[in-house]
Image (spheres, grey):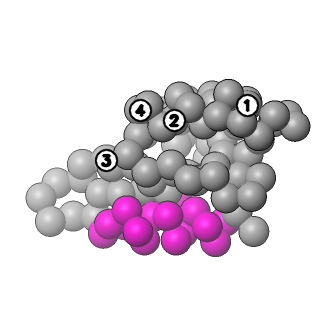
Amino acid sequence: MTISEGMKKYRLPNPTTPEDLELNWNKVLTFGDKVLLSGYYFNGKNKPSYFGAVYEFLTDDRTCEGAIGLCAVSEVEFEDDGHAIAWAMSQAK
């Protein structure tokens, strides 16, 4: 999925800060120089509804107020947030 498609479908902010993500999303992890996100997007009863997203720091400021930009969004939804984060971790290498 392109960055633009992910921003539109999941309403992902870009650019943003880790602090803003933590206020608006359930699972946000700093992982080295990346910030990983697991979000929920209802696709219907008994259908996978979790997605993963990866942000990268845009400056040397690695605090919660540092600027981050969206660099990857999963093309598929997952059965739970753990699988979404695992996907995000695999993209952050």
Identify the residue under disc 1.
66
Tell me, yes or no, whether the highlighted magenta stretch contains residue 93: no
Q: Are marks 3 and 2 in contact (CB under 8 Å)?
A: no
Quadrant placement of the C terminus: bottom right
Of residues 58 and 3, the one nearer the viewer is 58
> Which residues are drawn in magenta?
73-91
**Three-letter code for the amino acid on which mark 2 is drawn:** Leu
C-alpha gap between disc 1 and disc 4: 16 Å
Residue 47 shown left or right of residue 8 in the figure? left
Judge whether 47 appears above or below 18 on screen. Answer: below
Q: Amino acid at mark 3?
A: Tyr
Q: Dot 2 lies on which element?
A: helix
Residue 81 in percent (x, y) is at: 37, 62
The reply to whether discs 2 and 4 touch (Cβ–Cβ < 8 Å) is yes
Give the label on residue 24, or none. 4
**Residue at (24% x, 48% y) in the render:** 42
Mark in the foreground, 1 or 3: 1
Left or right placement of residue 32 versus residue 75 in this view: right
Q: Which mark is first along the chain, 1 or 2?
A: 2
**How far across and how far down the image is residue 70, in percent?**
66, 41
Q: Which residue is mark 2?
A: 21
**Badge 3 is on which residue?**
41
